[in-house]
Amino acid sequence: MEIYLLFFVIIIALLAYIVYLHLQLSKKNLFIDSTVRRLYGAEKSWSTEEMMSFLNEIRKVHHYRELFNDRLFEEQPLNFLLENEKDTKIFIHYTREEDVARNILKNGFLFVDSFYKTALSVTGDRLDLLMKHNSRKSFGDYLIILCLGNKITGYYSAEIEKNRLRGVAVENVLTEKPPVKNENSDQVYLLPNRFVKGFINHQTGEMVSNPEYDPNYDSENFRKNLEIFRARQTG
């Protein structure tokens, strides 16, 4: 009887702790959301210096200081992330393990069905980036940077439209290997590593570049993919 009572007390304590953590997380999310929303309408294109000044002010609020301990918004990591903004479409993805991040640099980026399920589009809008970063950074310390050149995406987007390929995204075309099905029968695609610029450890500020990075990389396999999609829809 005493053992069952002890188990019951432990379960109650764990449930109470989970509720406490949930309330704390909700408070932090509300704080971030309300702060950013108040500022968003006033200024959407802060400079790096202005953003750092803003974060330094937020750090003075002791209860939320841990939210802004990472280094992403320091000058070098931020410039590394956004320096190709005019010529590319930039996406970010988070992972927990450095080995996984390095594997993506070497072998490419896997995604299931839709590229946009796991890759977030970002621009030089610092406040938008702050909101997206704080919503996803719990997925891991390693921020993968994916860049697709405007030239290459523009060309294949036009080809998709010209061929009237329904439900086909440009990212599904920019693969060098045929998609495979996972255990859930979903299509798994591999974006070539040429479109992986590198990664940032947003806790330490460490940056790792991909020596094979080429945002306008083109391949004969991309044109073959167009033919495959066209054959499927006409056949």
Image (tube, rainbow, N blue to C red):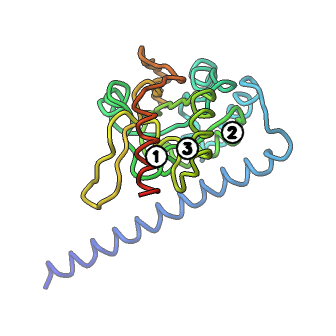
Q: Residue furthest bottom?
A: 1
Which of discs 1 and 2 lies nearer the camera? The answer is 1
Q: Residues within 10 Å of mark 1 (few under 14, many from 20)?
A: few
Q: Disc 3 marks which residue?
A: 120
- The disc at residue 138 is 1
Residue 190: image location, x then y, percent: 37, 38
Asked whether 186 or 72 is in front, the reply is 186
Mark-to-mark CA distance, 3 and 2? 25 Å
Mark-to-mark CA distance, 1 and 2? 19 Å
Which three-letter amino acid code belongs to the residue tagged 1? Ser
Q: How many marks?
A: 3
Residue 176: image location, x then y, percent: 37, 33
Q: Earlier in the sequence, mark 1 or mark 2?
A: 2
Q: Disc 2 marks which residue?
A: 58
Q: Residue furthest top?
A: 211
Residue 218 against residue 169 in the figure, above or below: above
Residue 133 against residue 166 in the figure, above or below: above
Q: Residues within 10 Å of mark 3 (few under 14, many from 20)?
A: some
Which three-letter amino acid code belongs to the residue tagged 3? Leu
Image position of 134 (left or right of 102): right
Q: Secondary structure at mark 3?
A: strand
Mark-to-mark CA distance, 1 and 3? 14 Å
Which three-letter amino acid code belongs to the residue tagged 2? Ile
Residue 168: image location, x then y, percent: 51, 50
- Check the picture and name the quadrant holding the C terminus: bottom left
